[in-house]
Image: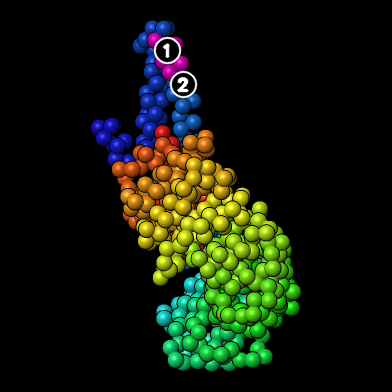
Amino acid sequence: MDTNADIASISGQECFLLAKDKLAAFSSLASAAVSSCDQSDIQHEQFRKLSVATSSSLRVLVALTNALATDNPKRGLFATAPPSVLAEILRAWQANDLSSTDSSPTFPFVAAAVNKHWRSVALSTSCIWTRVVFDFARAERRHEYFKLVLHRSKTCPINLRILGAPPSAYDETVPSELLLQLLTSASHIDIHFRYAGLHDMHFDDSILALFQADFPFLESIEIHTSRAHGAFPSGTRLLTSAPRLCYLGAGNLPLTAFDMDSLRSLTAFSSERGLSDEDYAAISSKWSGLSSLTLLPSRDHSERKSLVLPALTSLRCSRGAVITSFQSAEHFSCLRALDILYTSNILDALSALLQSSPCVSLQELTLRESFGNGPLPQTCLLALTKTVPNIQLIRLHGFLFSKTVSEFFEAWQQESTTTLTLLPNIATLVFERCTIDVSVANSVLRFLQRIRERRRSVDVVILSRSGTQSQFPLWLETRLRQVVGRLTVGTSRSDEPKCTSELTSGGASLITCTIPRV
């Protein structure tokens, strides 16, 4: 028999058995040779030692064969981690899955289908079953799926995203009892209502009516409704029993739709609806602990300067009326991040507000492109930067017209000391979804060169919607490396700009490629 060919064609356990049989046969021959008289004393002693060694090896091999026979027959065919390690891997997988709002939450089902070991760990790790995407366009016959997720998530609050919610009756799609169970089991809710056209929302039949229930786990909620849904019924209050709620995205719902007294622990609020003087006064009085405020539109009001938010660290607004609602910088003395449209209306309002009392706490300034506006006077931008001396990060978001970006950087080219005087602490420059052509690139290079001549360097981050858009011209990249501290090129996963902690911690939430300076 060809031993080498035999061993190459058999499994590990069969190899042990074959070796045991051959060693046993050899041991028998050695024993027979020892008992034979037809040999010298020297040969006899050699065969005796060989017999003893062979017998010892045979006992070890028999023990190994028996152990292998009683072990998992699939061992070695599929390498896997111990349950505790695999559970940690699944938790990390779930955390990454939660950051993607577009993909379908199928990963726990995939994990449970790998093999029995993975299924056992997946079913016992309840936190990986907490992400639910409820699309009303595809919700039929998915009732069992929702029930299964609720069962497997056990006591863990779920992360619920609802798409295409009807502005009126929904009972034909999903039973109200099941939908209410999903809502009240959630810690995070993001609900998008279907555009209703000219049809008003029928509140009593809509999902919004369910938000009058008890929400013991809810920590954040974002409600996206259309203005076409009509007036909200007077006297109705939502989320009156949500003791853990920290973030409220009210969308187009009026502030009167919520019981502000029951939401005293709120730390972040956003609205897409114009607020009145009375609304500003109520926010200052009842939500004075807000650290984050986002007010995109703003109706015309008397500008009574009624906003006072001493704990505010982040402000985003789209009109100057919000800025003028503050009496002075002392009313937002902790402000660290400001996100505004790049318009003369807002810049002038902010400069006027900070002229007598500069905002020394502000470290991050995000400027967004405002389409349809003409070029801004350079004095407008320079006047603002004088009032925010401690800016460390400037972010330009969505500038698609290269002329606007070039004008932004050319504002500092008038005097040799202007850049150092107005931006003494600038450390990071971020381009997010901006058009960067040769003209813009040269404006940026001149700006960075001026700073570098003062023995300082600035990190540059270039983020785009995809890896092929809005990149710095390749033939100027070498020159860019020479004047920056660090260059990061990558893709932003969200429409919202990243905060400094994300950008300076290695880009944990970005797909990035860091290019060191030459």
Q: Secondary structure at mark 2?
A: helix
Q: Which residue is mark 1?
A: 46
Of residues 361 and 95, the one drawn nearer to the viewer in this rendering: 361
Write down the quadrant of residue 243 in the picture.
bottom right
Q: Which mark is residue 187?
A: none
Name the residue rendered at 49%, 77% in the picture: 192
Q: Residues within 10 Å of mark 1 (few under 14, many from 20)?
A: few
Three-letter residue code for mark 2? Ala
Query: Are the residues at dot 1 and dot 2 in contact (C-beta closer than 8 Å)?
Result: no
Q: Height in image: 284 above or below 172?
A: above
How far across and down, in percent of the image, does residue 92 sit? 53, 54
Of residues 100 and 15, the one drawn nearer to the viewer in this rendering: 100
Name the residue rendered at 33%, 43% in the picture: 476
Of residues 66 and 47, the one drawn nearer to the viewer in this rendering: 66
How far across and down, in percent of the image, does residue 126 sit? 58, 64
How far across and down, in percent of the image, does residue 495 sit? 46, 64
